[in-house]
Amino acid sequence: DGARLYIDGKLVINRWRCQSFSKSIYRKRLEAGSHLLELHFFEWRGAARVQFDIFGLELIFALHFARLQSRMDELEKKLVESLKNAGQIARLEQEIRGLAKNISAMEMVLKERALALEKELAETRQQTEGQIVSLREEVKTLAQNIAEMEAMLSSALQSLMESIASVQARVAEVEENLAGQAEATAAQIASVHEALTILRDSLAVLEQAVGAVEEKQRALVSETQALEERVTTIETSLSESTGGWEVHWYEMVAPGVFGAKIGTSSFPLNFAFDWGYGRIYQLWDRVGFKAYARIYLPRGSRCYVKVAANNCFALYVDGKKVLEHWGIDEALPAGEGELELWLAAGWHDLELHYYEWEETAWLSFYWK
């Protein structure tokens, strides 16, 4: 990072601070004789590199002349090859013009297709929302029917139990009378047994009816669960129909200050990137982006979001800043932020700003 040079005890080059690799040149005529050179160097972080050269005037001229001669030889070879390939270049230019026309035609077709798909998506969403309302009404009606059937079944069971208790009491009374009256006729006994048989048959029929009602109730519960799962699936498909991020890349002229735009790309809605010390888009350091995304919520929901980055980021929801780790005068160290917020049903706009100033770079975004 930092270096300084002394000649005969005098400081002549002083770059004693943290910085990226740079060169300093000092020109001075030295008298004949011996001279004392003293070089100081330190490394703080990132890559380390140091280089020291000393030349006399004659050697410098010789090196410059050799470089110029080598460059002239290279240019002469490239000129000869360019003349040979002139015809190929003309043909390539014609092919490029033809490809440009084809690309323009394809862009028009893709734009028309995108408009048609957007219209179809809107119509499908309207139809799906109508189906959801209808399904919810059917579920409500089924629940009411189940409650009414349970009430009727409870009343019928209560009446049956009362009848059985009355018959059992009557049987006990008749049996006591028969025991006390030896002359009771067989016809009366048969009549009592017949009444018991009828009651048992009625009880069996009622038990079958109860079983059928319970089976119907289980089927209605299963159907209700299936309808609820279908509603959840439709709502999930609507909420997941959102695309990812549209990313616009910029050079950073200072920490937190965007410069010229250098290109565009795209990210999925949830992502995690670790560039390390490598290239980010087209640059190694001092690069950033502004990304835009839209999400659709079929109903009001509590949402969770988390962002982590090295170096800095800022998140906006519907134009309002909700998370920030942003350095203007200097690049901040790595940081993260998370929050929960309530969003109403419908479309919402997300905007994410990020920049990397130097050294390692990584960024992650999670939305639920």
Image (cartoon, rainbow, N blue to C red):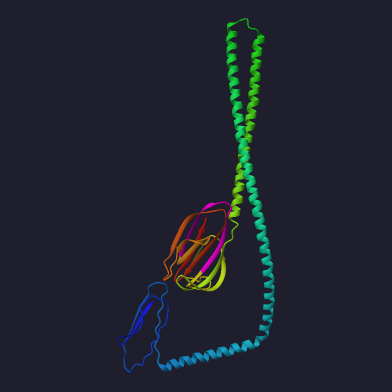
Residue drawn at point x = 64 percent, y = 15 percent: 193
Q: Is residue 64 left or right of residue 163?
A: left
Q: How many marks?
A: 0
Against 294, residue 289 (above or below) is below
291 falls in the magenta region: yes
In the current view of this chain or complex, which residue is farthest to the left? 9
State which region is magenta: 289-309
Residue drawn at point x = 55 percent, y = 60 percent: 349
307 falls in the magenta region: yes
Against 257, residue 201 (above or below) is above
The answer to which of 237 and 58 lies nearer the viewer is: 237
Residue 218 spot, x, y in % from top left:
61, 37
- Residue 114: quadrant of the picture: bottom right
The answer to which of 362 and 259 lies nearer the viewer is: 259
Q: Main secondary structure of the magenta part?
A: strand
Quarter of the image for the N terminus: give it: bottom left
Against 11, residue 199 (above or below) is above
Residue 133 spot, x, y in % from top left:
63, 47
The answer to which of 36 and 102 lies nearer the viewer is: 102
- Residue 137: quadrant of the picture: top right
In the current view of this chain or complex, which residue is farthest to the top? 183
Residue drawn at point x = 63 percent, y = 17 percent: 196
Residue 13 spot, x, y in % from top left:
36, 84
Residue drawn at point x = 66 percent, y = 54 percent: 124
Residue 252 spot, x, y in % from top left:
48, 73
- Residue 182: quadrant of the picture: top right
Q: Is residue 112 left or right of residue 150?
A: right
